Image (spheres, rainbow, N blue to C red):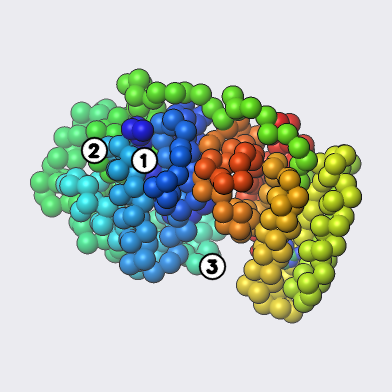
C-alpha cells in the first residue's frame, strides 16, 4: 500500500474530524487507534490518520509517540505527513506542538514547515498570524479558560516561537492571495533567513487549497482539519487518490444496536429525550456507578431483555446541577473515570453477547470504549451529522463492527436514529 497522505493526530476526536474531512474530500481514509501493529491488515486506502493521545502529555513522550507514527506512515509510502493539531492551537509554552514539529522536521529533511490551524468551516481563521475563534481573537475566546491549555496569546508566530527551537516566520494573506508561486518564493526567503517554520494566514477554504498545493510537495506540514482539506484537494486535483470509495459501500453488519451516552452536553441531553420517544432508554444511577458495582449488571440484564427487538439506549448523562453535585462529592476525575469505565465494561460485555453496531455519545466515553474493545482502526464511511461519520472496524480480531463516536455538542436532535439509519 502506498499512501497519498499520512497524518498524526494528537487526540482521538480530532483524528476523527480530520479523517471525516479527508473522506468528504474524496480520499478513502482509515483512522487507527495508536500506531498500528505491522501485522494490521488494512484495506486499500489513500490516507491513514494515526490517532494518539499526545496533546497534553510530557513533550518528550509526545515526540517519541509521534516519531513512531511517522516511521509507520513513511514505511507505508506516505511521502507527505500532516501533524494534526487542534484548530485552537491547544498547547502550552512547554509544547507539545513545537517540540513534535521540530522532531518531525529534523526527520523529514524539510528546511521549513508550513503551519496553519485555520479551519474556516468551524470559524477558525488566521490573519497576520493571529488566530480568531469566530469573531474574537483566541485570547478573548473561551479557550483563555481551558483547564489544561489556557490560550492567552492569539499571535501564533509568538506562541510557536516559545515552544520551538526554530525561528518562526509568517506567510501573510496577501502572499497567499497571490497564489502558490508567491508562497513558495516567500517560504524560500524565510528558510534562507533561518526560519524553520511559517504560520500561514487563511480565512477562506480557497486559501487552504492554495496552501495545500504548496504543502503537498514538501515532506511535512502542521495544521488542523483545514490543512487536511487543502492537502486532500491538492491530491484529488492531481488524481493522486486511488480508490475514492467509502465504507458505506461495505456489506451490512446487521444484528442488535446499542447506544451508550456518557456525554452530559446540552445537545446529548436533548438527543436522549428525543430517543425516548422511539426506543427503550435506561438511565443509569451515576452515584451507584461511582460507589458500587451493581449498575453494570443491572444495565446488562436490562439490555439483554430488549436488544433482540429494538435498538436500546443506556445513558449516564445528567443535568449540569447533578453532574456538579456528583463531582463535588467524589471528585471530578474519580467520577468521570468510574462512569467511563462502567460504559466501557457494558459495551464490552454486550459485544461478548454478539452486538456489533454501537453508537457512543461523548468524546472521553468513546475513547474509553474504543480502548477497551481493542479496535485497531476504523474505515470512515457515510456522514451521520457534520463531523460524525459512521465507522467500520478494521483489523479487529472479533470481525466486522460499525460504530458512531460523537463528541459533546455534535449531531441533530434525532442523532441516535440518524446514526442507526446509516449503520446497517
Ligand atoms: P463530551 O464529549 O460531551 O465532553 P465526554 O464523554 O468527553 O463527553 O465527557 C463526559 C464526562 O462526564 C465523562 O468523563 C463521563 O464519564 C462523565 N459523566 C457521565 N455522566 C456523568 C454524570 N451523570 N455525572 C458526572 N459525570 C458524568
The quadrant of the rendered image in which ligand 1 is seen is bottom right
Viewer-nearest of labels 2 and 1?
1
**Callout 2: helix, strand or loop?**
loop
Residue at image position (33%, 61%) is: 64
Image location of residue 139, percent across then percent down: 45, 59
Mark yes or no: residue 23 visible. yes
Q: Which residue is mark 2?
A: 218
Q: Quadrant of the image for the C terminus?
A: top right
Query: Quick check: 420 above or below 407?
Result: above
Query: Quick check: 52 above or below 118?
Result: below
User: How far is disc 3 from disc 1 in space, using C-alphas?
Assistant: 30 Å
Label 2: few (<14), some (14–19) or many (≥20) C-alpha neighbours in 10 Å: some
Which image quarter: residue 147?
Answer: bottom right
- Identify the residue at the far bottom of this view: 329
Disc number for residue 70: none
Front residue (pair 130, 402)? 402
**Callout 1: helix, strand or loop?**
strand
User: How far is disc 2 from disc 1 in space, using C-alphas?
Assistant: 13 Å
Label 2 or label 1, whichever comes before in sequence order: 1
Q: Is residue 10 left or right of residue 181?
A: right
Q: Which residue is mark 1?
A: 6
Front residue (pair 290, 302)? 302
Image location of residue 231, percent across then percent down: 36, 33
Which image quarter: residue 322?
Answer: bottom right
Q: Which residue is mark 3?
A: 147
Image location of residue 120, percent across then percent down: 47, 38
Residue at image position (62%, 38%) is: 400
Q: Is residue 32 left or right of residue 65?
A: right
Q: Quadrant of the image for the N terminus?
A: top left
Amino acid at each position: 500500500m502506498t499512501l497519498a497522505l499520512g497524518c498524526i493526530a494528537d487526540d482521538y476526536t480530532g483524528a476523527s474530524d480530520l479523517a471525516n474531512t479527508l473522506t468528504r474530500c474524496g480520499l478513502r481514509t482509515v483512522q487507527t487507534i495508536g500506531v498500528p501493529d505491522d501485522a494490521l491488515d488494512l484495506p486499500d486506502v489513500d490516507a491513514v490518520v494515526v490517532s494518539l493521545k499526545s496533546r497534553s502529555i510530557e513533550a518528550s513522550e509526545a515526540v517519541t509517540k509521534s516519531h513512531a507514527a511517522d516511521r509507520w506512515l513513511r514505511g507505508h509510502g506516505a511521502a507527505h505527513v500532516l501533524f494534526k493539531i487542534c484548530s485552537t492551537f491547544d498547547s502550552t509554552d512547554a509544547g507539545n506542538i513545537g517540540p513534535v514539529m521540530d522532531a518531525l522536521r529534523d526527520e523529514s529533511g524539510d528546511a521549513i514547515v508550513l503551519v496553519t490551524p485555520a479551519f474556516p468551516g468551524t470559524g477558525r481563521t488566521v490573519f497576520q498570524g493571529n488566530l480568531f475563534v469566530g469573531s474574537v481573537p483566541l485570547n478573548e475566546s473561551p479557550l483563555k479558560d481551558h483547564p489544561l491549555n489556557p490560550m492567552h496569546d492569539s499571535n501564533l508566530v509568538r506562541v510557536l516561537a516559545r515552544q520551538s527551537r526554530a525561528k518562526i516566520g509568517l506567510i501573510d494573506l496577501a502572499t497567499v492571495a497571490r497564489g502558490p508561486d508567491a508562497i513558495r518564493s516567500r517560504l524560500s526567503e524565510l528558510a534562507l533567513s533561518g526560519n524553520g517554520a511559517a504560520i500561514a494566514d487563511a480565512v477562506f477554504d480557497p486559501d487552504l487549497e492554495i496552501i495545500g498545493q504548496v504543502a503537498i510537495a514538501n515532506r511535512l506540514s502542521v495544521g488542523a482539519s483545514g490543512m487536511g482539506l487543502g492537502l486532500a484537494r491538492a491530491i484529488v486535483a492531481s488524481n493522486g487518490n486511488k480508490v475514492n470509495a467509502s465504507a458505506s459501500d461495505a456489506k451490512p453488519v446487521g444484528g442488535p444496536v446499542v447506544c451508550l451516552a456518557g456525554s452530559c452536553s446540552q445537545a446529548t441531553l436533548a438527543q436522549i429525550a428525543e430517543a425516548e420517544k422511539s426506543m427503550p432508554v435506561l438511565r443509569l444511577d451515576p452515584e451507584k456507578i461511582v460507589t458500587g458495582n451493581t449498575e453494570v449488571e443491572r444495565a446488562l440484564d436490562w439490555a439483554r431483555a430488549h436488544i433482540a427487538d429494538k435498538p436500546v439506549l443506556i445513558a449516564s448523562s445528567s443535568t449540569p446541577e447533578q453532574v456538579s453535585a456528583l463531582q463535588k462529592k467524589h471528585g471530578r476525575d474519580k467520577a468521570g473515570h468510574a462512569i467511563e469505565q462502567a460504559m466501557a465494561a457494558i459495551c464490552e460485555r454486550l459485544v461478548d453477547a454478539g452486538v456489533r453496531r454501537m453508537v457512543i455519545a461523548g468524546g472521553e466515553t468513546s475513547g474509553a470504549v474504543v480502548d477497551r474493545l481493542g479496535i485497531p482502526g476504523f474505515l470512515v464511511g457515510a456522514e451521520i451529522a457534520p463531523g460524525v461519520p459512521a465507522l467500520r472496524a478494521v483489523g479487529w480480531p472479533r470481525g466486522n463492527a460499525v460504530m458512531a463516536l460523537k463528541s459533546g455538542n455534535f449531531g441533530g436532535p434525532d442523532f441516535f436514529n440518524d446514526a442507526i439509519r446509516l449503520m446497517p
